C-alpha cells in the first residue's frame, strides 16, 4: 500500500552521519508504553468489583497478555526482522492502542470477554511485537556495546510501569470518585480504591490514545544503519571479551536446532519463574514476614500505615528491577554474558535461601535480598538479547529473541502457579478468625480465603513462604547448570559465506 | 557506505537532546513518584 510505504525498511535507512544516539529514545518510546502491562494492579480491584468477577478471572487479563507476548514475538519474529523496526513498531502501536480501545468498550458495556480480546489478545500481540521490534536494530547500531544498547530499551519496559502507575491513579481520580470496600470490622478500607466502570473505561480510552501518539515518536525516529555501517574505530576482531566475539551467523530456523537455544530457554525460564514468584507477591509478603504474635504488623508503629509502607517496598524493588535491566546488561559487555547469568542464578540462589531461612529476622536483610533478586530478574531480561548475539550473530537475532520469549510466557504461568498454589494451600490450613464488626456491633467470621478465592491478609507468616522460596532455590539451580552447559554454537549451523542480515537481505 | 538521502544531517545535538528529553521526562516523573512512595518504607509511613 503506497500510503504506508514510509514504513518500509528502505525509507528508514539512516543517512551518512546519522547519530546512533537517536536510536535508543525511539526504542524507549515503545518500551515505556508497553511496560504499562506491569501496572495493572492499580485498577485490578475496580475491575473485580465492576464485573462482579473473581480475582482469578481478572488476573487472566494480565496472564493472557503475557502469553500473547511470548507467542506473538515467536510467530512474528522473522517478520519483524525482515520488515524492519519501523513497520514493526507501527504495528505494535496499532495493536497496543486498539487493545485499550476495545477493552474500554468492554469495561463500559460490562463484557469481560471484550477485555480479554482487547487488552489480552490484541494488546498482547502489540506487547510481543513492540518488545522485540527495536532490539536487533539497537544491536546493529551498537555492535561494540550490545549489552548497553539493549539494556537501555528494556530498562524502558521496567520504567513503563513506574510511569503508568501514578498516571493511571491520577486519571482515575480525575474521571471518577473512589469508593472503599468495608473491612471485616465494618470500617472502610481506605487503602483500597474502587472506581466504577465508566471511570475505568475512560482511563483505558485515554491511555489508548496517548500511547499511540507517543509510540509514533518511536516509529518516526527509528532508523536502521546503512549496509556495512560500523561505529568509528570499531574492529570486531578486537572485541574486549571473548564472549562478545561473534563466531558465525545463524538463522532462526537453525538456531532452534541447537542445544544452546534450549539451554538458554531454560535459563530464562528459571530466572523469570523465580523472580515473578517474589515480585508479584511483594506487598503481602513483607506484611506477612513481619507480623507480631497477635497478628498485627511489626513493619510500622502505626497500623494505618502498613499498606503505605508495603507500597513503598513495592516501589523500592521496582527501582531495582528497572536499574538492574540497564546496569547488569551494561556490565555484561565487560564481564561476559555467561558470567552475568552465573551471578543472576548463583547469587540469586543464595538470596532466596537467605529469605527463606532468615528473611523474617531483619527488615534490612529481607529488603536487601529481595532488591538484589529484583535486579537479577530485570538483568536476566535485558542481557539475553546480547547473549543471543554472541551465540548466533546479528543475522536473525530479533527472530531468535522472539522465539526465546516463549520462556517468559511459560514462566508467567509457572511462577504464580508454584508460589500461589503453595500459599493458597498454606492459607486453607489456617483456622478462621472472629472479628468484631464495629458498624453492626456483631462478631463476624473471617476466613483465610474469601469467596473470590483471594487469600485474605493477616493469616500468613514467614514460615508459610519457606517451601516456595526453597523451591525457587531449586529452580535457579536448574537454570545455573543450564547456563554452565552453554558453549559456542557448532559451525555446522553457521550460514555459509558472508551474509546480509535479515533486514538487508530483504532488499 | 551509500546514502539514499541527498542531505547529510551533521548537527544532531539539538535533535538528540530533544529526543532524550521526550523519553526521560515521563521516566523522570515516574521515578520521582516512585521515590516518594519508597520514602515511606524508611520513614514508617
Image (cartoon, helix red, strand yellow):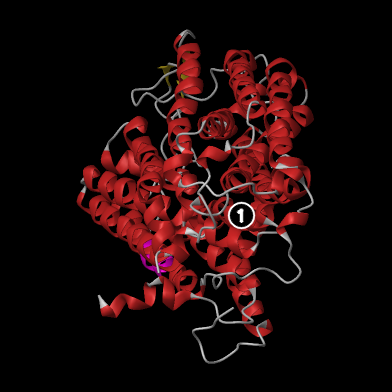
Q: Nearer the viewer, residue A83 or A342?
A: A83
Element on which disc 1 rests: helix
- Name the residue at 43% across, 68% down: A86
Examine the rendered structure and indicate whether residue A43 appears above or below residue A460.
below
Q: Which residue is mark 1?
A: A150
Q: Residues within 10 Å of mark 1 (few under 14, many from 20)?
A: many
Residue furthest toward the front?
A: A497
Q: Main secondary structure of the magenta part?
A: helix
Displayed quadrant of residue A89: bottom left
Give the image location of residue A401, x and y in percent: 50, 46
Q: Which residues are magenta?
A: A206-212
Q: Chain of mark 1?
A: A
Give the image location of residue A154, x and y in percent: 58, 52
Residue A425 shows in the view: yes
Q: Nearer the viewer, residue A466 or A29?
A: A29
A252 left or right of A151?
A: left
Displayed quadrant of residue A452: top left
B5 left or right of A147?
A: left
- Name the residue at 73% across, 42% down: A336
Residue A314 shows in the view: no
Q: Nearer the viewer, residue A354 or A398?
A: A398
Amino acid at each position: 500500500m503506497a500510503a504506508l510505504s514510509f514504513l518500509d525498511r528502505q525509507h528508514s535507512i539512516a543517512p551518512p552521519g546519522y547519530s546512533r544516539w537517536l536510536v535508543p529514545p525511539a526504542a524507549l518510546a515503545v518500551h515505556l508504553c508497553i511496560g504499562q502491562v506491569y501496572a495493572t494492579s492499580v485498577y485490578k480491584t475496580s475491575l473485580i468489583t465492576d464485573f462482579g468477577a473473581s480475582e482469578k478471572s481478572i488476573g487472566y487479563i494480565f496472564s493472557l497478555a503475557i502469553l500473547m507476548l511470548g507467542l506473538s514475538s515467536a510467530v512474528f519474529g522473522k517478520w519483524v526482522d525482515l520488515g524492519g523496526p519501523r513497520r514493526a513498531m507501527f504495528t505494535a502501536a496499532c495493536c497496543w492502542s486498539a487493545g485499550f480501545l476495545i477493552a474500554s468498550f468492554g469495561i463500559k458495556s460490562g463484557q469481560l470477554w471484550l477485555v480479554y480480546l482487547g487488552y489480552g489478545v490484541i494488546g498482547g500481540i502489540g506487547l510481543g511485537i513492540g518488545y522485540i521490534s527495536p532490539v536487533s536494530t539497537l544491536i546493529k547500531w551498537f555492535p561494540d556495546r550490545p549489552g548497553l544498547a539493549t539494556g537501555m530499551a528494556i530498562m524502558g519496559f521496567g520504567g513503563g510501569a513506574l510511569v503508568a502507575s501514578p498516571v493511571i491513579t491520577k486519571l482515575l481520580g480525575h474521571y471518577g470518585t473512589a469508593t472503599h470496600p468495608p473491612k471485616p470490622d465494618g470500617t472502610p478500607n481506605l487503602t483500597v480504591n474502587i472506581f466504577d466502570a465508566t471511570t475505568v473505561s475512560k482511563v483505558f480510552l485515554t491511555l489508548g490514545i496517548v500511547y499511540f501518539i507517543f509510540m509514533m515518536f518511536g516509529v518516526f525516529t527509528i532508523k536502521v544503519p546503512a549496509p556495512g555501517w560500523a561505529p568509528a574505530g570499531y574492529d570486531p576482531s578486537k572485541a574486549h571479551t571473548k564472549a562478545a566475539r561473534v563466531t558465525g551467523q545463524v538463522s532462526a530456523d537453525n538456531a532452534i536446532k541447537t542445544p544452546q537455544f534450549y539451554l538458554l530457554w531454560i535459563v530464562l525460564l528459571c530466572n523469570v519463574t523465580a523472580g515473578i514468584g517474589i515480585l508479584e507477591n511483594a506487598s503481602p509478603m513483607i506484611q506477612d514476614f513481619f507480623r507480631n504474635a497477635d497478628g498485627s504488623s511489626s513493619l510500622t508503629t502505626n497500623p494505618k500505615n502498613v499498606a503505605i509502607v508495603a507500597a513503598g517496598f513495592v516501589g523500592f524493588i521496582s527501582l531495582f528491577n528497572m536499574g538492574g535491566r540497564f546496569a547488569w546488561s551494561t556490565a555484561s559487555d565487560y564481564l561476559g554474558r555467561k558470567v552475568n547469568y552465573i551471578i543472576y542464578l548463583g547469587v540469586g540462589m543464595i538470596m532466596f535461601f537467605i529469605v527463606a531461612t532468615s528473611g523474617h529476622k531483619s527488615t534490612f536483610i529481607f529488603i536487601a535480598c529481595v532488591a538484589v533478586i529484583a535486579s537479577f530478574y530485570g538483568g536476566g531480561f535485558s542481557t539475553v538479547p546480547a547473549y543471543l548475539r554472541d551465540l548466533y550473530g546479528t543475522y536473525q537475532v530479533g527472530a531468535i529473541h522472539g522465539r526465546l520469549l516463549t520462556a517468559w510466557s511459560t514462566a508467567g504461568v509457572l511462577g504464580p502457579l508454584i508460589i500461589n498454589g503453595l500459599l493458597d494451600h498454606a492459607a486453607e490450613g489456617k483456622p478462621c478468625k472472629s472479628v468484631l464488626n464495629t458498624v453492626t456491633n456483631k462478631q463476624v467470621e473471617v476466613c483465610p480465603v474469601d469467596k473470590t478465592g483471594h487469600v485474605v491478609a493477616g493469616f500468613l507468616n514467614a514460615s508459610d513462604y519457606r517451601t516456595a522460596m526453597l523451591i525457587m532455590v531449586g529452580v535457579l539451580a536448574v537454570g545455573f547448570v543450564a547456563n554452565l552447559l552453554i558453549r559456542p554454537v557448532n559451525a555446522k549451523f553457521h550460514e555459509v559465506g558472508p551474509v546480509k542480515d535479515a533486514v538487508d537481505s530483504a532488499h | 557506505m551509500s546514502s539514499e538521502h541527498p542531505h547529510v544531517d551533521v548537527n544532531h545535538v539539538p535533535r538528540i537532546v530533544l529526543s532524550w528529553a521526550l523519553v526521560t521526562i515521563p521516566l523522570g516523573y515516574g521515578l520521582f513518584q516512585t521515590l516518594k512512595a519508597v520514602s515511606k518504607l524508611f520513614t514508617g509511613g
